[in-house]
Amino acid sequence: MCLLVQMHIPRDLKQFASIFFEHNYQCFLVGGAVRNMVARRKVTDFDFATDALPEQVMRLYPRVVPTGIKHGTVTVLYKHHHFEVTTFRVEGTYSDSRRPDTVVYIPSIYEDLKRRDFTINSMALNLSNNVLLDPHNGKVDIKNSLIRAIGNPVERFDEDGLRILRACRFASQLNFTIHHDTLSGMHICRDKLLTVSAERIRDEVKKILLSDKPSIAFRIMDDTAILDLLFPELSACKNVEQQGYHEFDVFEHLLRSCDHAKKEVPLRLAALFHDIGKPQAMQKDADGNISFHRHEHISEKLALAIIRRLKFPKVVEKETTHLIRHHMFNYQENWSDAAVRRFLHRVGVHNVDNLLYVRKADQLGMGLSRKISPAVDEFRRRIRDVLENDAALTVKDLAVDGTVLHEKCGIPKGPEMGQVLEFLLEAVLDDPDLNVETTLLDIGKKYYSDYIEKKNKQ
Ligand code: ATP
Ligand code: MG
């Protein structure tokens, strides 16, 4: 089906495409950009399809990077854009379910559109005349908020298992439902996902996590038994009952917390996994009271295994596990300023904002129509006061360092120096007025001589 469309096409795109036309090549806008334009959603990246071969595209523009040359894709740096340009192609077999073994270039955009995953992703906008090609009726599916595989879903998913997860991703990004035949194809072909590389899965999971409502994707994974394959630790949280403030089981609570978390990968991951250790930590006493003592440590360990399995970068691993490890703080209004300072020392000043965001998500994920406990805001205010007073929170903030303690008190540099500095920090966290060089030298000297005396007696 061809439609002449009334869509605003940015001038840079028209200018970019005109160079193709001047050289008698075709140029279509394809993929997510067309889908999002039709759905009137924000477009973030632009993919193009052309009959020009990659080396021909490389001759048309001065700045071209051969990013996926094996699959016919190059990235053209045009003004401030990174445009992905792929030559019309059909794909050969997918012997390892990762990437097609071979690609074959073809002259027709229609053949190219047939090899794409979903109807909503198989439209092409001809930039020479504004005609929208929509041979698989993607526009109607967009109107009906429907994700539907092109042709036979089982064949599509069998060719590339990642498409199963992509369907979940588009459902959560667009808030669409998945057509029942497509859904049942996902279920039938679910084992294909096990042959897909961790990096490709991670990139889709990342997009799911950054969507408005990641829970949509995780629920679909649950319905199609994908969750057991990709996140068995999350599956284990289903029907794990909680008491007290909690309205939901652990699984439901985690999904809701994730939806409420700030849209950053480590925060979304921390919210999704913060209680994932509860099934293992659960204990029930004789009166039927449930507790999850030290579950945060089990959650941290499980989250680390998942994050590593999916090959997220080290920084994501570090930040997420840190947030999970510390998520169980229990601020009370009667905490002393020293307790607030000790908390900041423990979790680190630069993590505290994110930890409070995770707490907020955790509370909103509990249901019971609970508003955010006023204690969190109060805590934030107390933290601000401590930070404004410039209190020492780490050894580096002390008025003395190892060199001064060595020179003026004769304390040898080595492991004992670390102990002395930690002791001084404890003292200063309790009473910031002690953070004066002469005072700390006195305390340090005394601590060290007591330590030596005790050691000699042993
Ligand atoms: P976004 O860029 O917003 O993440 P997108 O739909 O553009 O979404 P891309 O991964 O950029 O997704 O792929 C561009 C297009 O290439 C898709 O719209 C689809 O037509 C096709 N495509 C991508 N991956 C696959 C796949 N695994 N199988 C079939 N077609 C695919
Ligand atoms: Mg894209």
Image (spheres, grey):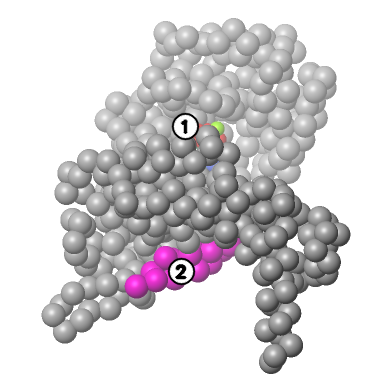
Quarter occupied by the C terminus: bottom right
Which residue type does callout 2 highlight? His
Q: From the viewer's perspective, is 38 left or right of 407?
A: left
- Which residue is under mark 2? 297
Q: Position of residue 131 (x, y in %)?
A: 48, 13
Residue 449: name its quadrant. bottom right
- Label 2 sits on a secondary structure element that is helix
Mark 2 packing: few (<14 Cα in 10 Å), some, or many (20+)?
Answer: many
- Which residue is under mark 1? 122
Magenta stretch, main secondary structure class = helix
Quarter occupied by the N terminus: top left
Residue plotted at (81% across, 55% down): 404
Residue plotted at (46% across, 33% down): 121
In the image, residue 445 lies in the stretch drawn in magenta: no
Which residue type does callout 1 highlight? Ser
| Among numbered discs 2 and 1, the one appearing first in the sequence | 1
Mark 1 Cβ inside 8 Å of ligand 1:
yes
Front residue of 117/105: it is: 117
Q: Position of residue 218 (x, y in %)?
A: 36, 52
Front residue of 308/246: it is: 246
Disc 2 from disc 1: Cα separation: 46 Å
